[in-house]
Amino acid sequence: MTTTERSMEERRKFRRIPLVTEVRFRPLQEATPQKLTPLQRLDLGEGGMFVPTEEPLPAGTYLALEFSVPTSLQPLNIVGRVAWIGDAVKGKGMGIEFYDLDPHSRLELLRFAQRGEWAK
């Protein structure tokens, strides 16, 4: 782990685990079609995720996210906020902070967490 990665881990409230999946996203206030990321490795935590994308949305944008975790039969539909853009370590993309998780999504994230490092 590099010094930059270590300092980011220390600042986070929640630990992160990798997840390979596709993500659909769109700004909440727009009727634009959802964008779909290719199947790729995401950095997922209880409070948010990093979504690699060539077309990140501006910081502060609220967006609708849809993605799957292996412990759920249905995709999760989550509202998030773009907290930051890009990162020298992770590459081009956006750091998403989950906003007002519904009970189903919270439960599924916790189930997934039990299989990963942030449950320890």
Image: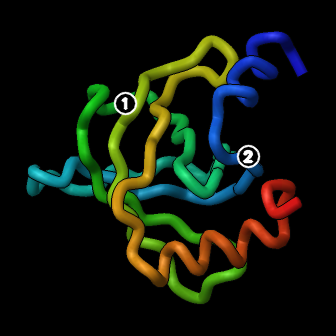
Q: Residue 15 has which mark? A: 2
The image quadrant of residue 78 is: bottom left
Q: Amino acid at mark 1?
A: Pro
Looking at the image, tell me whether mark 2 or mark 1 is earlier in sequence order. 2
1 up-or-down from 39: above or below: above
Q: Residue 71: percent from the left, percent from the top?
A: 70, 80
At mark 1, the secondary structure is loop
As rendered, which of 52 and 47 lies closer to the eye?
47
The CA distance from mark 2 to mark 1 is: 23 Å
Tell me which residue sits at (10%, 51%) in the image.
Answer: 29
Tell me which residue sits at (52%, 22%) in the image.
Answer: 92
Query: In the figure, is residue 91 to the left or right of 99?
Result: right
Tell me which residue sits at (84%, 70%) in the image.
Answer: 115
As rendered, which of 103 and 69 lies closer to the eye?
103
The residue that disc 1 covers is 56
Q: How many marks?
A: 2
Q: Amino acid at mark 2?
A: Arg
